[in-house]
Amino acid sequence: MRDKVLLTHKFVELIPRELEANTIYVSVAYATAIHKCCCGCGNRVVTPISPADWKLIFDGRSISLDPSIGNWSFPCRSHYWIRNNRVVWSDQWSDEEIDAGRKKDARATAAHFNRKNAGKAEGSSSAKAKKVNNNGLKSKIKKWFGVKTLD
């Protein structure tokens, strides 16, 4: 059984060079959360926030990350969840479980980007049509604020 770890969170634009222990830094601008490994080894744990990576939940008081954090490439091989600023330790994974998890993550990432790129391809002709039609929302907002453009 591991020690209980309570984290604090800091919303920052840029991640500091030196990280404080038991602090998770969240950069919304860069869609990233970073902290020192909760086992105490001191390694930097980078968790990109995106539909293909981690989901960050901020309830106004605390941070949660989903899915779990498996530091398989670190010597510590720690595995934990961050729930409401608390570290919830999880079981170590075998090499086979790690390999299966990495393959699952790779498939999920590929699926995410395939969906995203398919939407761009479908939207390219409609994007041209919107550019021709200058009555879109962006144009209305510019007109409202009196912004003149060279469209």
Image: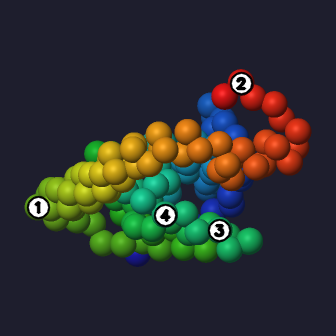
Disc 4/disc 2 C-alpha distance (Å): 40 Å
> How far apart, in angstroms, are the residues tagged by discs 2 and 1?
58 Å
- The disc, 3 or 2, on the residue closer to the chain's N-terminal end is 3
Tag in front: 3 or 1:
3
Q: Residue at x 42, y 59 (%)?
A: 51
Tell me which numbered mark, 2 or 1, is placed earlier along the sequence.
Answer: 1
State the SS at label 1: helix
Dot 4 corresponds to which residue? 55
Q: Which mark is residue 58?
A: 3
> Would residue 22 be seen by someone viewing this image from the given angle?
yes
Circle 2 or circle 1, nearest the eye: 2
Say if 2 sits above or below 45 in the image.
below
Amino acid beneath label 4: Lys
As shown in the figure, which amino acid type bears the numbered disc 2?
Leu
Residue reaching furthest top? 150
Residue underneath mark 2: 150
